[in-house]
Amino acid sequence: MNNPQEPREYDAVLGSNSLSPEGAAVLGGIEGVKLRLQNPDAKVRIAALEQALNYGEQGLDLVIAGLKDESVEVQIQTYHILNSRTETKVKQALISHIQGLKLEKIELVTTNKYGEIIQRQQRIARYFTEDLGNGVNLEMAAITGGTFMMGSPENEAGRQNNESPQHQVTVPSFFMGKYPVTQAQYQAIMGTNPSHFKGENRPVEIVSWNDAVKFCELLSQRTGKNYTLPSEAQWEYACRAGTTTPFYFGESITPDLVNYDGNYPYGYAPQGEYRRQTTDVGSFPPNAFGLYDMHGNVWEWCFDDWVDSYNNAPTNGSAVTISINAKLLRGGSWFITPGYCRSARRYYNDAGFIYYSYGFRVVCDAGWTG
């Protein structure tokens, strides 16, 4: 049996920033919870919030305050802690939750190497909405910052040499478009719709990198926020959403999950439908950040200039800009085989090039919080 007098993993230590140095006194009770909530480690704060409910109304108030924590991860976990509570003040706090951002329940699916769904999970994603006028909205998902391995491992099927060397990158928090920019959104900002496959909720295509950058500039002027194309590191980090498999779904995909040329399977997955066109955004399951269509549908322009390896690549999530005309594309498309849709797959074309499988999505600084 554990000694109840011994400090636990997340117990706060009075007079020190460390968890349990030799000879220090452990501060327990509600005061210990309060101290742990000041810890810079989000995991420590989450653990403290889970314990806070043991201390009645005062503890519940601390949990409610966790909805405004600086960490998106802490905010989401706080929502999970409170979601089953019935107190009026809890319901009111959840309704007016978090700096104008809304919470949305999403379902994640995980696949095996045969493309079979082996798990379904309920998660929470967070968004803010930009009003573009005439009933057109742009939803932006909150992307929690973190560290990941960018690129593909040597044993990943379909990998290219330009996806190496794998390297660790730390990406600050940001917001990213829930979907690729739609034709309705593009029309609202640019006044035109160049797309071949028409549909207000389909992704805009036949847009160049130059067009996408202009859209971001005009959107920034309209909203007063800093909208840009994602860096390549932001894009891959957001696509993976904590996964290390070839796709955010898992080891393989099928056309039931991604819009690509289903005549060509990936790995052990079966063949399937080839739609020969784009589909409405959001037609397939999202990843853990609440992002849709990161695999397939349309290629997505990134801000970076093309380089053919990750030698000397930035490790802080920033874009590579070496003043050349070749620009990065990510995600694959309806037109392409599934290997091109992998999280790590890289592609490029000239900044002025247009094609009916080229689109984009936008990112926004996390410094704006509503």
Image (spheres, rainbow, N blue to C red):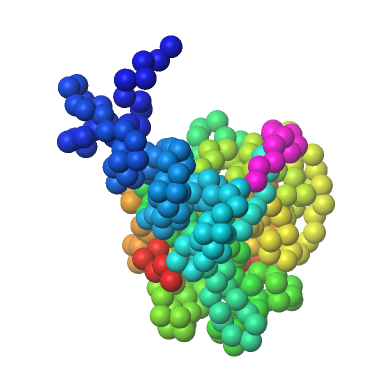
- Judging depth in this view, the residue of 4 and 137 nearest the camera is 4
- Judging depth in this view, the residue of 110 and 42 nearest the camera is 42
Q: Which residues make up the magenta segment?
A: 111-122
Which residue shows up at 65% across the image and 46% down it?
122
Which residue shows up at 42% across the image and 41% down it?
55
- Judging depth in this view, the residue of 322 and 283 nearest the camera is 283
Residue 354: % across, % down: 59, 72
Q: Can the viewer see residue 220?
A: yes
Q: Quadrant of the C terminus?
A: bottom left
Residue 317: % across, % down: 37, 53
Taking 110 as reference, is 207 above or below it?
below
Residue 114: % across, % down: 74, 34
Which residue shows up at 63% across the image and 39% down it?
250
Q: Is residue 243 magenta?
A: no
Residue 7: % across, % down: 31, 24
Q: Is residue 121 magenta?
A: yes
